[in-house]
């Protein structure tokens, strides 16, 4: 059974903006799924349908096979941890401790267990000792991490992250990618994230949905989606930088690739293979 499934879903904002049209999407347990799209493609709108913050105009949203409706919302929101694009939409407490404690108190955590869960979550996102700070005085990247810590502390089954690396510095983004992959691998938490950053996708997703103008235009395993480079470009996106470099090398006849590398690691492997072939005189 799919954890999250949308079938034939459309959504129109009250001002008449058609934000989503005929969306079919499914997320299976343990997957890492990217929703990739340019600004205004409909990613954030889509995510708000997952946990009933918005309701479809047409079509059906189910979580674990049950339609997301009022009587199911509490359970759905417990299963799906949502980290918003803008942390200011998420953070509301006067201290970081209270922010993270809020959901945990509802789970009846108290005393030492509560404090340890809070400090553990802050440790994981790289903000140890931030308990007494005000979330509103933090930098954009720090706010983002506090929002993630508060959701992670609840141990959701699915982590839905809207632009998890936007507003983070390069090292911070790399750490979050590593952290999220670790959470997926070691805790089995399913990941769904939205991004317009094509370089992040191969590092963090096994499967990709490409959105444009409220529609899903392309989907499939990450390597297959990026192999459709004309379609990627037609939808206001680009190839990951290393794939673009490989494309230029191939175009200029300098190097041939069976498939374009998408990450630095893949590029290094592919280039070393080409060098070895050249040295062995097989090319
Ligand atoms: N509250 C709203 N009322 C009316 N239109 C809205 C509202 N929120 C979003 N939209 C419109 O819906 C469309 C999709 O917006 P959405 O925020 O889902 O895009 P996105 O893919 O998340 O973009 P970004 O990458 O900039 O975050 C856009 O055309 C946007 O202008
Ligand atoms: Mg958005």
Image (tube, rainbow, N blue to C red):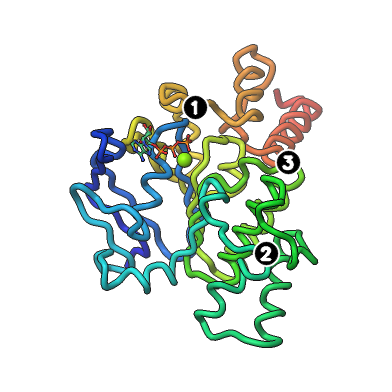
Q: Which callout, 1 or 3, points at the residue further toward the start of the chain?
A: 3
Tell me the SS state at disc 1. Answer: loop
Report the disc number at residue 96.
2
Q: Quadrant of the image for the N terminus?
A: bottom left
Count of numbered circles on the image? 3
In the picture, residue 167 is in which quadrant? top right
Report the residue at 61% width, 66% height from top.
99
Report the residue at 60% width, 58% height from top.
147
Question: Where residue 102 appears, x then y in whole percent?
Answer: 56, 72
Q: Which callout, 2 or 1, points at the residue further toward the start of the chain?
A: 2
Q: CA distance from mark 1 to mark 3?
A: 22 Å
List the residue tagged with mark 1.
Answer: 237
In the current view of this chain or complex, which residue is farthest to the left?
58
Viewer-nearest of discs 2 and 1 = 2
Q: CA distance from mark 2 to mark 1?
A: 36 Å
Question: Where residue 83 appears, x then y in whole percent?
Answer: 53, 55
Question: Where residue 80 appears, x then y in whole percent?
Answer: 44, 65
Tell me the SS state at disc 3. Answer: loop
In the picture, residue 179 is in which quadrant? bottom right
Viewer-nearest of discs 1 and 3 = 3
Viewer-nearest of discs 3 and 2 = 2
List the residue tagged with mark 3.
Answer: 169
Of residue 60 and residue 234, the one placed in the foreground of this image is 60
Question: Where residue 229 appears, x then y in whole percent?
Answer: 48, 26
Report the residue at 51% width, 82% height from top.
107
Q: Does residue 80 lie above or below 169 as drawn? A: below
Report the residue at 33% width, 65% height from top.
63
- Horizontal relation, residue 18 to residue 129: left or right: left
């Amino acid at each position: 059974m799919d954890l999250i499934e949308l079938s034939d879903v459309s959504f129109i904002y009250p001002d008449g903006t058609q934000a989503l049209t005929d969306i079919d999407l499914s997320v299976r347990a343990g997957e890492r799924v990217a929703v990739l799209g340019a600004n205004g493609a409909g990613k954030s709108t889509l995510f708000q349908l997952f946990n009933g913050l918005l309701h479809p105009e047409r079509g059906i949203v189910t979580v674990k096979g049950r339609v997301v409706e009022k009587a199911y919302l509490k359970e759905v929101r417990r299963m799906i941890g949502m980290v918003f694009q803008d942390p200011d939409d998420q953070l509301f407490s006067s201290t970081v401790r209270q922010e993270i404690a809020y959901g945990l108190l509802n789970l009846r955590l108290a005393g030492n267990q509560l404090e340890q869960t809070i400090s553990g979550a802050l440790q994981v996102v790289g903000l140890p000792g931030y308990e007494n700070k005000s979330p509103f005085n933090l930098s954009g990247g720090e706010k983002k991490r506090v929002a993630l810590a508060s959701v992670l502390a609840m141990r959701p089954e699915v982590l839905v992250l809207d632009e998890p690396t936007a507003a983070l510095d390069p090292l911070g983004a790399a750490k979050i990618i590593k952290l999220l992959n670790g959470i997926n691998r070691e805790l089995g938490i399913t990941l769904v994230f939205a991004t317009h950053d094509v370089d992040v996708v191969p590092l963090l997703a096994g499967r990709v949905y490409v959105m444009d103008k409220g529609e899903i235009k392309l989907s499939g395993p990450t390597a297959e989606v990026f192999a459709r480079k004309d379609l990627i470009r037609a939808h206001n996106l680009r190839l990951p930088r290393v794939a673009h470099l490989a494309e230029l090398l191939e175009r200029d006849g300098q190097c041939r690739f069976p498939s374009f590398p998408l990450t630095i690691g893949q590029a290094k492997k592919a280039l070393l293979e080409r060098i070895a072939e050249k040295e062995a005189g097989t090319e």
